[in-house]
Image: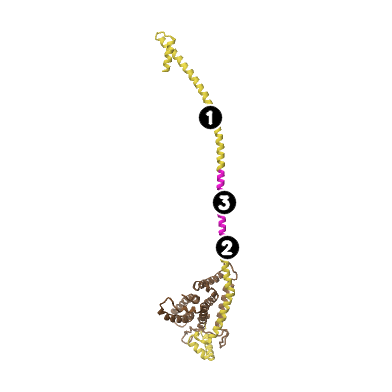
Amino acid sequence: MATAEHSDGLAFHPMDQFIVKPLFGGETLNWYTPSNATLWMAVVILAVIALFVLGTRGRAIVPSRIQSVAELAYGFVHKMVEDVAGKDALKFFPYIFTLFCFIVFSNFVGLLPKAFTTTSHIAVTALMAVAVFLTVTIVGFVKNGAGFLSLFWVSSAPLALRPILALIEIISYFVRPVSHSIRLAGNMMAGHAVIKVFAAFAPLILISGIGVAVTPLSILAIVAMYALEILVAFIQAYVFTILTCVYLKDALHPHH
Amino acid sequence: MSNTTQTAAETVTETAGHAAEAAGHAAQSAGMPQLDFSTFPNQIFWLVVALVVIYLVLSRIALPRIGGIIADRQSTITNDLAAAEELKAKAVEAEKAYDQALVDARVEANKIIAEARADIQKDLDKATAKADAEIAAKAAESAGRIDEIRAGAAKSVAEVAKDAAEAIVAAMGAKADAKSISAAVAARLKG
């Protein structure tokens, strides 16, 4: 729909795929209106239920294929939390696993043609990043009291440097949610936009002679970008999750 | 793809959209939909709903179940390994018992063989002794007869020699008494 054709033949609307609109028509988008974002979040929920609830229904000692995938995901994140943030971080495992599942499924269902990628929106990723930031900060102060501030006081550095380092550490601490959220949204948005741009070139063969060369090239480029996006979809979910673990480690063990 | 139909449809929606919310749409089409803050409450609301649902599904149902499955598997494996270890120990024990039985049997067999050999040896010795005695008796008897024959032969030789000597002396024209001839023959036979 986004590639509407105008008088010059080609039209580039690579960002139109990200427009949030009411799902059942209408113009006004209230906070409660079911939107295309709602639809694809629902798809993600169903996918999570299908994999982790229906897939493990058999509780088999020798797992079925789908149960193996569920166990693999569980083991992957469980090990990550344990290795990065420590054993006492395991009580946050359901929380981290929820984020991981939401992101990885959103990224992958967003790759379906015509799909809406919820994680390409800064509103979505920022909420998750801020949630992680607040959780980590609150846990840090509850667990360590004022001792959490020692995270900013680099005791291994020379005394003269410590105030400067503390300033840098504090700034970097508050920049965390920004980088945490923009990294994910930016990656998702850029990849999908690039695919859309190539897709806009694809019908050129119907319009002009130069399309004979351009159309196969753009189709090839779409395929290549798609493969890259599959990689990125997983890697960005992994990065978001492992950074959450790293931040949580700082909160639980602020002494470097 | 029917270009005309699509273009028409697009035009209709475009105009409708522009008419309805000109301001919002202008901001949207100019920049990124991500920065259209009017959609934020909607997205955030539904995201919170989605995250809460996923969290509840995972933490109430899925994660305890998967954790349980993995723990079950671990304990099954541990139990099986322990059982295997036990069976292996039993097998080793059984092998040892078998070896012991084998050694015992061999010792027993050796004893029986030795006894049998001793019995046979005794019988053999008895038979050998008896045979030796018989042989000795027969040999002694034979030796007696040989001596007899020899004695008889020696006597015959002396007589023949005496007769021959007498005949030779007579042929030479002399007369010799029997006494001196027998003495000469005896001396000759001795020498």
Asked if B106 appears above or below A109 in the picture, the reply is: above
x 56%, y 55%: residue:
B91
Residue of label 1: B132
Residue of label 3: B97
Q: Earlier in the sequence, mark 1 or mark 2?
A: 2
- Quadrant for residue A31, please give it: bottom right
Q: Amino acid at mark 1?
A: Asp
Q: Do tags 1 and 2 sit on the same chain?
A: yes
Residue of label 2: B79
Q: Amino acid at mark 3?
A: Ala
Do callouts 2 and 3 mark residues in contact (Cβ within 8 Å)?
no
Q: Give the residues drawn in magenta, as a range.
A: B83-109
Q: Tell me which secondary structure the magenta stretch mostly adopts.
A: helix
**How far apart are the alpha carbons under marks 2 and 3?**
27 Å
Q: Is residue A39 visible?
A: yes
- Quadrant for residue A59, please give it: bottom right
Does residue B90 belong to the magenta stretch? yes
Q: Drawn colour of chain B?
A: yellow
Do callouts 3 and 1 mark residues in contact (Cβ within 8 Å)?
no
Chain at numbered mark 1: B
Asked if B165 appears above or below B65 in the picture, the reply is: above
Q: Is residue A210 visible?
A: no
Foreground disc of the pair 3, 1:
3
The location of residue B187, given as percent across then percent down, is 42, 15
Chain that the image shows in brown: A
